[in-house]
Amino acid sequence: MKNSNLKKNVYLGQVISTNNYEIVYLPYSVGCLAAYAWQDEEVKSNYNPPKFIFKRERIEKALESIVEPAVLALSCSVWNFEYNKALAKAVKELYPSCLLVFGGHDLPPGDDLLKTEDYIDILVFGEGEKAFLNILKALAAGGSFKNIKGLIYRDQASKIISTPPAEVLDLSDCPSPYLNGMFDPLIENNPHLGFNATLETNRGCPYDCSFCDWCKSKEIRLFPLERVTEELEWIAKNKIEFCFVADANFGIAKRDPEVAKLAVKTKEHFGYPKIFSPTYSKTNFDTVFKAAQILFKGGMNRGVTIAYQSLNPAVLKNIGRENMTLETFSDLKERFVKAGIPIYTELILGLPGETYESFLRGMEKLMEAGQHHCMPVYMCQVFPQAPMAQKEYLEKHKIKTVKAPLHEMHYYADFSGVQEYYDIVIETETMPFNDWVQTNLFSACLKAFHHFGLLRCFAIYLNKEKGLRYLDFYKNLYEFLYDETSLVGEIIFGIKKQLEDCDQADWTYKNPEFGENGWYFDEGIFLELIKKYDLFWEEIIPFLKNFEIDEEIYGDLLAYQKVIIRRPSISLVEIELKYDLKNYFDMVYFGQDTILRRERNLIRINPEQTYNSLVEYAKHIAWYGMHRGASVATSDPKAVSVKYL
């Protein structure tokens, strides 16, 4: 049946893979395109209000909601690129005259996509608001796209044409998709859904990290504070719990603590949003601290990330990055610890110039600087528009990648019949594949035993009192455990087999006993050892006895180390000690010199919440609680008390 309305239909798609059909992200990126375009009278007179594709449904189901489209524009990210291609191809088969427009962060540069996917008409690069507006106007007028900047397109003669790059937008000209009503029908028509929101307070990034494709503009451009205030209120009034802040460096602007205050004030008044989740700046530490402290006290943020990526000077030069000094990190960490705010450091494994030894030494340096609670390690991913993806860069550093199936950590992604992929670095000139496997294995073990806390107390004690390097302790442990017949060895060799299988490239840890979702390898090791806690200690005690710790101290240390690890179904625990271990380790975490005092004390551990099933324990302790060190009971001051006898 033909549409009698003379105006044309426009569809904009931005989907994300999920197995939770009750909570979805509002399609902010394409919402910005729509808000910018539909402020134009010519667009409004030629096109119906835009319709959004935001749920990842099976292609045949998605097609049911697309009727006589004149334009389908899709925002491409690593989690939806294959889906976008499948949807676009299906739409083109049904509606050959529909103009198919692709844009977004993970759009491959150049014109190769137009050559391989002949159903796509236009590629948009850079900020797409102005380009999309002009595409709609040109289409309505029957004109050419040749004067629209930032495009690669196929003309009527199938010739591929590139136009000059687009200019950077003046953000004062960009209306908000929240405030101009773009998402109101979407909210009203889906009362059964919960939504997450994306908020921008600025655009731009001054850094040139080779692995990143976040921003093309080095200039930091601020959205008006009045707009940010009104958007937060809109988010709150629509009872949206989670707000992701899409600034590349929250805290880089002096006003960002004020933005944090606005978020907290909005929550206090309306009850929403409950979580305000930014990516923090790598500099401007005073501003970052002030903003983080405001959000933490307001209950809106669980911790602060310091993204180091690598501590190897050669790597930092290769990736165009500068880090804060370790002295600065130690000072900053002390400030956060005193304020009770969790702080965690991120590293990337597989960057050019890194070696097995340099990566492990980088982890050790952070531990020496006081990072004992959380140190996420991510496999290096090559994004299509990042400098690292350029042929010259890949060849220079002899980078080899594998196209791995995308498996979202911490939930089992339902891809609705279309698998997504990402390119993972498995080898560089300085890190052969076998070293890459071993680095993954060792770092996973170190994080399981130290940052999840299983042997952290022994490592710290031996470092402070015996001068034993952290790396030597964990290398000795790794050598001791590297035996397929042991509990830990069996787990390690299973992970090793996974890592070596590049054909499957399924690099998530899975055990249905912990839930249907996937886990990072360190999380998997930790959860397996929690499941067989007593057997783990039977195997590990012979290793610990090799260090000839004073018998009384060893007895206390062993008892303390065992009891502070939170386990399923364990609530109230009391233990009497001869040494004041709780205060000793607290001082270490505060970055202060201390001595181990011999003083009888009774430690009482009584967590507010106990999880009886492995699934609930895994979710709340290994996942939700990872950044605040929830696996160790002493990370929560309210859960532990000490009585001196």
Image (cartoon, rainbow, N blue to C red):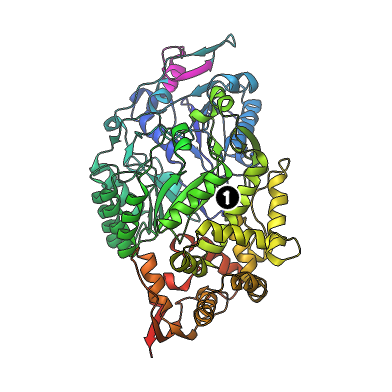
Q: In which quarter of the image is residue 589?
A: bottom left
Q: In this view, does 320 lie to the left or right of 450?
A: left
User: In the image, what residue occupies the spot 52% across and 12% down?
Assistant: 161
Which quadrant holds the C terminus?
A: bottom left
Q: Is 140 within the magenta?
A: yes
- The reply to whether residue 241 is in sight is no
Please tell me whether residue 613 is drawn above or below residue 329 in the rendered image: below
User: Residue 498 versus residue 359: which sits nearer the camera?
Assistant: 359
User: Residue 174 versus residue 543: which sits nearer the camera?
Assistant: 543
Please tell me whether residue 47 is drawn above or below residue 61 in the rendered image: above
Identify residue for label 1.
18
Q: Is 405 within the magenta?
A: no
Task: Give the residues drawn in magenta, as a range.
Answer: 135-153
Mark 1 belongs to which amino acid? Answer: Thr
User: Residue 427 versus residue 156: which sits nearer the camera?
Assistant: 427
At numbered mark 1, what does the secondary structure look like: helix, strand or loop?
loop
Q: In which quarter of the image is residue 294?
A: bottom left
Q: Residue 266 at what x, y percent from top left?
A: 28, 56
- The reply to whether residue 215 is in sight is yes
User: In the image, what residue occupies the spot 56% across and 25% down?
Assistant: 396
User: In the image, what residue occupies the spot 65% across and 31% down?
Assistant: 90
Which quadrant holds the N terminus?
A: top right
Q: Residue 417 at what x, y percent from top left?
A: 68, 43
